[in-house]
Image (cartoon, grey):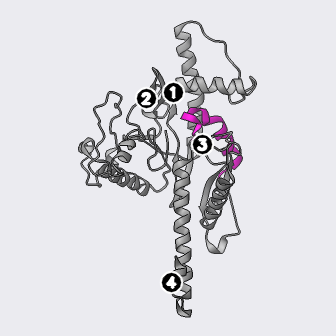
Amino acid sequence: RCGTMAASPSSGGGLIAAGAAARRSEDIADLIELFSRTQYRAKEVTPRVERVEKRCLELFGRDYKYSVIQNTNGEVCGHYPRQIVYLEYESVEHNKDRFESTVQISKLQDLVNRSKMARCRGRFVCPVILYNGKHICRSSTLAGWGELYGRTGYNYIFSGGSDDTWAESEEVPEDDSAVRNGESQLFDKVRGLDIKLLRYLSVRYICDLMVENKKVKFGLNVTSSEKVDKAQRYADFTLISVPYPGCEFFKDYKDRDYTAEGLVFNWNQDFVDAPLSIPASFTKNLNIDWSDYQSWDLVQQTQNYLKLLIHIINSDGECLTYLHPPSGSFLLNSH
């Protein structure tokens, strides 16, 4: 495009800058097209995706010191990058060659490997944004017993009967009370490991964007939420329930030619049972009438939720917040 413009010595620099900007714009458009049309799988990486991964590490390295959680062939999570970046801290120009890790990366890797089964599709709690020394994490929601039993059985079979994620195998109980007790012990184990990871990452707040307390498919509870954990295992964390529509709803957004104004979620559907629940300390200064949240269109709902989340992140001097939305993608995460 720039070749059609008349060039002069004084305009040469401007033409080069314009050409570089045009190439960057095209690169971004190509990346968005790749992202929107291709499902990422860590064990099926193409040369093009390898270039993207390498570029991401280069860009992270410009501003941050970071460690890497290895996920070479998707062993930890098939949907996370092969090299999962853990941002340690922002690097400063006069100290770029010095690095001191803020965590034991080997311990973090071990906790990740052991806790991944607690989360839907193995999408464990993972720090993704570093802001003012605070991490914002993402994950899927908790795995329900339907997925948990299915996935542990799958891993056991395909590991040749030697899956070391769990300790000794147990006999299959015969009566209902024994089954319930076995389920409770399994949840104690997997969610206990999940909580260990949360505590190691110093997580204090959990923002839950599910519109249902539990997701049911084919009569099975496949996912659940910290706020309805019967044993109250997550009671030490501040749980914030801000229900936000999942990916199914965004089909309507696409069908409306990506027009969000006037698009309101139907809160009267049978499966929608998650309440809006926000500590008063986070809402009193935002000038938002939260009682009207079910009447908001997608634009207003997104704006108000972002105001809340940014307020939470800014209001606490040392908090590390983690968010998991419903079945699609909002802000940071998938379900």
Q: Can residue 258 be seen by looking at this rendering? A: yes
Q: Are marks 2 and 1 in contact (CB under 8 Å)?
A: yes
The local secondary structure at tag 3 comes to loop
First in sequence, mark 2 or 4: give its number.
4
Q: Residue flagged by tag 3: what amino acid is it?
A: His
* Residue at screen point 64% across, 61% down: 55
**Residue holding disc 4:** 5
Q: Main secondary structure of the magenta part?
A: helix
Q: Residue flagged by tag 2: what amino acid is it?
A: Lys
First in sequence, mark 3 or 4: give its number.
4
**Residue holding disc 1:** 144
First in sequence, mark 2 or 1: give its number.
1
The segment highlighted magenta reads 102-124
First in sequence, mark 3 or 2: give its number.
3
Alpha carbon distance from label 2 to label 1: 8 Å
Whether residue 247 is in magenta: the answer is no
